[in-house]
Amino acid sequence: MTTRLTTTGLLQVSGLALALGTGAPAPALAINGQVSAEYAVSFLGLPIGTGTMVSSTDGTTYRTTLNARVTGVAAMFAGGSGTATATGRIAGAAAIPASFNIEVHSGGKVETTRIAMAEGNVRSVVRNPDKPPHTRATPVTAEHLRGVVDPLSAGIFIAGGTGPVTGAAACERRSRIYNGVVRFDLIYAFVGTRQVEIAGYKGDAAICSVRFEPVAGYRTDRSDIQAARRRSAEITLVPIQGSRTLIPARISLTTGYGTGVAQATKLDLNPGLPVARRASAD
């Protein structure tokens, strides 16, 4: 496990789990303000990282920033940190990204990826250093880059309709994701509703299963990619106060080596609370 892979994994894999709904407006219940969450990431029960998300909306547009750091046992082998930011707007119950930037610091080196988007289509990608794709990787075509979202915007969950916010409408979706290198889909399905209690939230949560489907940018002969399609993953979503928007409170991923978990340790889900009052409440 290299430093870069560990840190990037926290931002883009665990990060996708931490890449939390933005507090963006639901179709009939627009909200303004900021939400935040703190996460602990573990593998086989051992701590490997932390993440902090801050998201804000003005009722139409959103901005989400996620900071991640390798900690605990993993830091003995691979230290590192990273920041990812996504911006965009909400149309109905869908995120329409405008930009996605990620910066990873590891081993004294910095790697960055910047994606510009418009109406769900990728307009440009700038990576530094710019590494050519593997010769055996499935090409990412122009068609693959239409109607997609970035890894952070993919974390916006809005329950459509008028049924329970933590019901089936919270989960049923297919996210077409591009991270600057690879295209993949995440397919969600409703498992059930469960009571949860986390610092900052107590109540119903929607439980969704998650299935990974590689699309392009991967080597088809990579065993880990094929194994990822068979892995069991589950995500727990809790609602933001006063809206039909939800954010991940927990994600678990079972692999052939063990289970990884990203667990919220603190949630602030009241977007209407002024920042000054948040500070005094803390």
Image: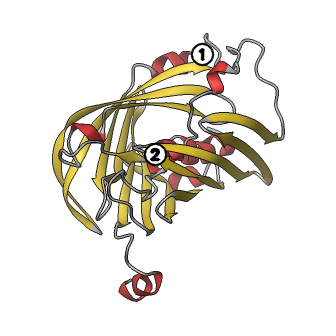
Residue at 42% x, 49% y: name it. Answer: 42
Position of residue 64 measured from the top left corner of the image (x, y, whole percent): 54, 58
Q: Is residue 273 visible?
A: yes
Position of residue 196 measured from the top left corner of the image (x, y, whole percent): 20, 55
Residue 99 left/right relative to 133: left
Mark 2 → mark 1, Cα distance in angstroms: 26 Å
Residue at numbered disc 2: 155
**Residue 269 marker:** none
Residue 276 left/right relative to 171: right
Residue 197 left/right relative to 176: left
The kind of residue tagged 1 is: Arg
Identify whether 94 is placed above or below 24. Answer: above
The kind of residue tagged 2 is: Gly
Residue at 71% x, 52% y: name it. Answer: 103
Q: Earlier in the sequence, mark 2 or mark 1?
A: 2
**Closest to the observer, 210 or 140:** 140
| Residue sitting farthest toward the bottom | 280
Task: Please identify the quarter of the rendering in which residue 252 is found.
Answer: top left
Q: Quadrant of the C terminus?
A: bottom left
Identify whether 188 is placed above or below 235. Answer: above
Q: Quadrant of the N terminus?
A: top right
> Mark 2–mark 1 contact, CB under 8 Å?
no
User: Dot 2 lies on which element?
Assistant: helix
Residue at 83% x, 36% y: name it. Answer: 130
Residue 124 left/right relative to 21: right
**Residue 222 marker:** 1
Mark count:
2
Position of residue 157 measured from the top left corner of the image (x, y, whole percent): 38, 46
User: Dot 1 lies on which element?
Assistant: loop
